Amino acid sequence: MSHDKPGRVLVVDDEPLNRELLEISLTAAGYIVVQACDGQQALDKLAAATFDAVVLDLMMPIMDGFEACRRIKSNPVHAQLPIIVVTAVSDRESRLRAIECGANDLLTKPLDLHEVELRVANAVKLKRLYDQLERNLDDVRRLQQHRDNMTNMLVHDIRSPLTAIIGFHQLLRMDIADAVAPESLEYLDVASESAAKIARMLTELLDIQRLEEGKLELRRFPVDLDALVKKTITPLHSLLDGRTVELVPVAGTCTPNIDAELVGRVVENLFSNACKYTPRMTHIRVGVLAVTHGVEVFVGDNGPGIPAAQQDAIFERFNQGARSGARTRGCGLGLTFCRLVMAAHGGDIRVVSEVGQGAEFRLRFPA
């Protein structure tokens, strides 16, 4: 066996001769073997030490192999521990029962010791691959936590001076409004808008993290969704720049229990994206409709569309999408924020799109 550290195998059988034969064979193959004479003793051994595989006889007194296998697998600590069951019973029912109890492999007596060695080798390899995967995942989790901590620290450190920049821009504009050329005021306005955009991005980043951690509490009340959508997009008409909005009338009143502030930001994100991707002199469709067991909001554009293979990825963090033709690109957080807000409401967001046919984003709120 080509491992730096020998594999540890627990052999469980009520027959001493069988245990001895298995220990001799597996020890010669390079394993450390520990014996147990029944299921209860096997559980005690597993509680006291770690193993890479278990060779388990099914027919034993006190606690048979079926029950021992079930108990081992029901313990989260041992859920991935490979169990090779050994039985003199060859009937189909016993084999199926062993598999139902969690057995990973089956051997029939009389045993071929060479086959036992091969099966154990595969089981130990499988366990070590799983353990390595768990270690890798732990490393990834630590890195993600470190990244989130760094993000929080940077966001909080940036927000204070950024707030000062925005405030002093506003004061400066009031002081020089009558003393400088309009072009200069436009430059100042662009700087102020850029600073405000950065502030919104920082807020969004913090909210995404809080939503992922389940720490952002929703303030839910019955809300007229149609009125909320209209109220949200009205101040954004300056983004249209030659485009038009088609507001699809809603039939009846749709008043789901939602956090109006968060949902308003979701609609704002979708409408802003539609303005980015929709060509001038075409229109954007926005509306609310009642559907089976819920309510939907849709925002559709006439842009280049999104390839089917990339439609799921656009909702992931820092993905800037696969569409071309946008005048500006965001930081890839807007749709992630939308997805998390909808999930927090027990709803979902999806996109219906074909390349060259635009894209329609749909928010579904449960009734």
Image (cartoon, rainbow, N blue to C red):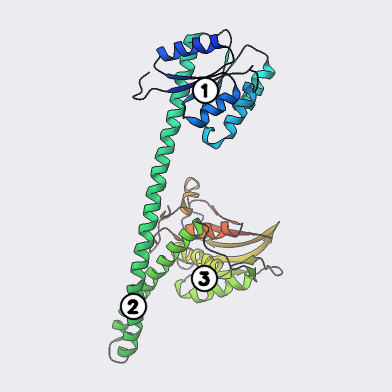
- Residue located at (43% from left, 24% from top): 125
Q: Mark 1 points at which residue?
A: 54
Q: Where 280 sits versus 356, above or below? A: below
Residue 90 left/right relative to 263: right
Residue 23 in picture, x, y percent from top left: 47, 14
- N-term-proximal mark, 3 vs 2: 2
Q: Give 354 or 83, whichever is nearer the viewer.
A: 83
Q: Of helix, strand and loop, which one carries label 3? A: strand
Residue 279 visible somewhere in the drawing: no
- Residue located at (62% from left, 67% from top): 220
Residue 202 visible somewhere in the drawing: yes
Q: Of helix, strand and loop, which one carries label 1? A: strand
Callout 2: 10 Å neighbours few (<14), some, many (20+)? few
Give the amino acid type for the residue marked by disc 1 in the picture: Val
Task: Identify the image quadrant of residue 324.
Answer: bottom left
Q: Mark 3 points at which residue?
A: 244
Q: Give 280 or 220, whichever is nearer the viewer.
A: 220
Q: How many angstroms separate mark 3 from mark 1 (CA)?
A: 69 Å
Q: Where 86 sits versus 263, above or below? A: above
Give the amino acid type for the residue marked by disc 2 in the picture: Ala
Residue 317 in picture, x, y percent from top left: 43, 54
Image mark for residue 216: none
- Residue located at (33% from left, 24% from top): 4
Quadrant occupied by the C terminus: bottom right
- N-term-proximal mark, 1 vs 2: 1
Residue 100 in picture, x, y percent from top left: 64, 27
Task: Identify the image quadrant of residue 178.
Answer: bottom left
Give the amino acid type for the residue marked by disc 3 in the picture: Thr
Q: Mark 2 points at which residue?
A: 164
